[in-house]
Image (cartoon, rainbow, N blue to C red):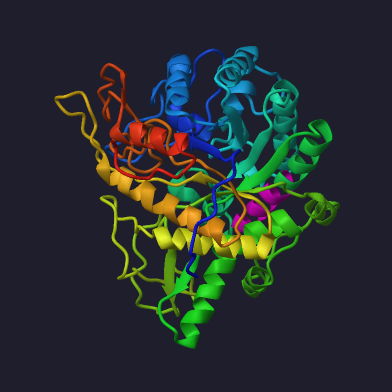
Amino acid sequence: MLHKSLKELPKDFLWGASTSAYQVEGASLEDGKGPSCQDVKEVPEGTSDLKVCADEYHHYKEDIALFAEMGLKTYRFSISWSRILPEGTGAVNPQGIAYYNHLIDECVKYHIEPLVTMFHFDMPAALDQRGSWSNPESVEWFLNFAKVMFANFGDRVKYWLTINEQNMLTLVGPVIGTLMIPAGTKNVLKETYQQNHHMLVAQAKAMVLCHQMLPQAKIGPAPNISLVYPASCRPEDILASQNFNAIRNWLYLDMAVYGRYNNLVWAYLEEHDAAPDFAPGDAEALASAHPDFLGCNYYSTATVGAWKEEADQGKADQAVLPGAEGLFASVKNPYLPRTEFDWEIDPVGFRNTMREIYSRYHLPIIITENGLGAYDTLGEDGRIHDQYRINYLRQHIEQLRLAVSDGVEMMGYCPWSAIDLISTHEGMKKRYGFVYVDRDEFDLGTMKRYRKDSFYWYKQVIASNGDDLDDLK
């Protein structure tokens, strides 16, 4: 669709940026914090552990001041479950509550809207030992955690996200370091989707609780949504793309919005004797949740063809998911460039994805992650010239504006990440931030913050409400 002129973005558009607690805070066991699954996992060889990260725990005032200088309207961050509930349940850690109160107050001081993710890949280790999401009690664990957050922070936090990338927790949980399969499990697929079911019920009940406790607040999910292309117009490839779209995307949004399982996914699970068991009240709980908006993480699209036994499915992560026997085979898209870390770059796919989401669900969308991981270098001039990141973000914001002109209701855009942090797979060397942190994989350096060129460019974009996407003046 061609537009003679583009629609303006809303005047209250939430320009922001994102982080997560376990990747940015550090202070992993300080001030009463209990260990999370991320603190006790075995990190990939050659990458940093998560004890210090960007040390935002001790630098939050400096960091929020930088975000305010950049002009952020919102800051998307997560709350560490084990920082406020060290055992996952039971006693509340007052020092953890105090830290997040200070962080939120600092945002409010600069008129930055806090956008809080409730769960971002960091189950308390104490609850891992009790079965994590495998345990049906996990629904009530999460609901209790939500109640503590709403009670302590709900007077200042108007926007909440439930579970970050639940689809990735389900599809590539072992890669992220989060999925626990109990020893002796015979049907791993059923166990995986039973855990997913518990998360879906927990999310639904948390949405209802939010609307009860905080009637003025808004809440939504935050899956990683990427439209899946067929490798060709061959009918079998179309079927494959429908299969993967359902498994990767629509299961999670259908459930969040409509409270029911996607029919293609349910048929797939039944075929493998993997349909989750419903506890009494689950169906009613799922149907009672009504998100106010949809948070979506977007990095690239996916491409699939009909299943082939000999297909090379590549290395699994959030961008590349393995094929599924009889359903689809992952295919590299020959029309797309790739990042230094071999992720495809598809700005037009961003528009494609937003159009499809909005046509299916008709709810406002906020982009909760979108960004470029790269090997950034601090130059002798004390600058980081990351023109490649500027180019990437410009291309995606251009497509965002086209999506708005298509009639998609976009309420905000929060690139990943506000500041350099520890990447889930590649450690500190894979940098995403607008702000450079002076440390490398194992040498903690000075921890000094440096504004990248993209910092100044994004400041210009925000000041113009997305109208000025030109290179730095």
Horizontal placement of 463 versus 73: left or right?
A: left
**Highlighted magenta segment, given as a residue range:** 191-202
Q: Residue at x 41, y 29 (%)?
A: 50
Residue 199 inside the magenta-drawn segment: yes
Residue 430: name its quadrant. top left
Q: Residue at x 29, y 37 (%)?
A: 472
Q: Residue at x 73, y 28 (%)?
A: 150
**In this view of the protein, can residue 445 be seen by the observer?**
yes
- Residue most toward the left? 380
- Residue most toward the front? 4
Residue toward you, 79 or 48: 79
**In this view of the protein, can residue 42 be seen by the observer?**
no
Horizontal placement of 40 versus 156: left or right?
A: left
Residue 408 inside the magenta-drawn segment: no
Q: Residue at x 76, y 57 (%)?
A: 259
The location of residue 265, given as percent across then percent down, is 63, 68
